[in-house]
Image (tube, helix red, strand yellow):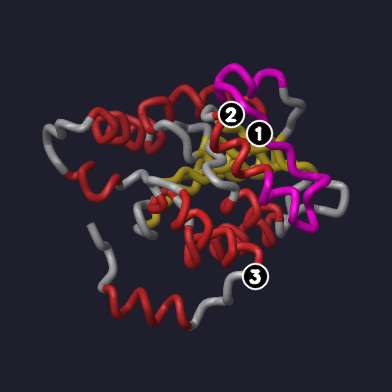
């Protein structure tokens, strides 16, 4: 589902900061080599992630769901000089692909791509985190969220992708398990007093939660 007319989206992209050359090359490689290139954050959302990271100026970032490394590179743009970014990916082939691109970044020494299940890896990581981005398995968002919150600093920001799921969250009884999980997750977070919540209709839905 397109939430913005294609002509409007094209205009917005044309008037948004261009992708850095490394990200443009990674986007092209992802579209050529991946079976699911739509999972890529892409130009507009990627620049939004980079802008948010530059505003937060995080010392520690945690990403759940690396895919090919595009969003990690965007988030790394705002890292403090001695900051660290941890990106978690369950699929070994994605980790291998992403690492070849993450190693090309200026921030390569500060980006750590870990393979494994997020709910098992998060407790092993040192916090607190200033910024987090959740983009893993949609049915497990609630589990990621509960594992992540204790690791966030007060005033930290959690971003969650795909929370509109091509509009399927509007269905009263969706047949897609991911849509049902996202419906429940969105309601839960809206009612969670631990965060200040805003859901933006950006691309496939981007939720922003300020830890209070």
- In the rendered image, the residue lying farthest to the front is 33
Are the residues at dot 3 and dot 1 in contact (C-beta closer than 8 Å)? no
Residue 96 position, x and y percent, is 62, 37
Task: Report the Cα–Cα distance between label 3 and label 2.
Answer: 34 Å
Quadrant of the image containing the N terminus: bottom left
Write down the residue under mark 2.
Answer: 149
Please name the residue shown 75% across and 49% down the image: 103
Magenta residues, as a range? 100-124
Q: Is residue 210 magenta?
A: no
Residue sitting nearer the eye, 103 or 6: 103
Label 3 vs label 1, nearer the camera = 3
Looking at the image, is mark 3 or mark 1 earlier in the sequence? 3
Residue 172 position, x and y percent, is 12, 37
Residue sitting nearer the eye, 33 or 79: 33
Write down the residue under mark 3.
Answer: 21
Are the residues at dot 2 and dot 1 in contact (C-beta closer than 8 Å)? yes
Would residue 39 be found to the left or right of residue 124 on screen? left
Q: Residues within 10 Å of mark 2 (few under 14, many from 20)?
A: some
Secondary structure at badge 3 equals helix
Residue 87 position, x and y percent, is 64, 38
Are the residues at dot 3 and dot 2 in contact (C-beta closer than 8 Å)? no
Quadrant of the image containing the C terminus: top right
Write down the residue under mark 1.
Answer: 152
Residue 154 position, x and y percent, is 67, 37
| 167 relative to 15, above or below | above
In the figure, residue 52 lies in which quadrant?
A: bottom right
Please name the residue shown 25% across and 62% down the image: 2
Looking at the image, is mark 3 or mark 2 earlier in the sequence? 3
């Amino acid at each position: 589902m397109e939430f913005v007319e294609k002509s409007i989206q094209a205009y917005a992209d044309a008037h948004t900061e261009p992708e850095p050359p490394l990200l443009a090359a990674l986007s092209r490689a992802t579209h050529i080599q991946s079976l699911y290139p739509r999972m890529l954050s892409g130009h507009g959302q990627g620049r939004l992630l980079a802008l948010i990271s530059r505003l937060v100026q995080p010392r520690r970032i945690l990403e759940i769901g690396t895919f090919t490394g595009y969003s990690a590179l965007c988030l790394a743009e705002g890292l403090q000089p001695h900051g660290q970014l941890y990106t978690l990916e369950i699929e070994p082939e994605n980790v291998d692909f992403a690492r070849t691109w993450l190693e090309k970044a200026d921030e390569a020494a500060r980006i750590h791509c870990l393979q494994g299940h997020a709910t098992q890896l998060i407790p092993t990581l040192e916090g607190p985190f200033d910024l987090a981005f959740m983009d893993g398995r949609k049915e497990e968002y609630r589990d990621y969220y509960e594992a992540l919150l204790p690791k966030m600093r007060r005033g930290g920001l959690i971003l969650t992708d795909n929370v509109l799921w091509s509009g399927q969250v509007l269905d009263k009884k969706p047949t897609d398990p991911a849509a049902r999980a996202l419906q429940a997750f969105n309601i839960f977070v809206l009612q969670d007093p631990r965060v200040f919540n805003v859901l933006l209709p950006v691309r496939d839905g981007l939720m922003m939660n300020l830890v209070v």
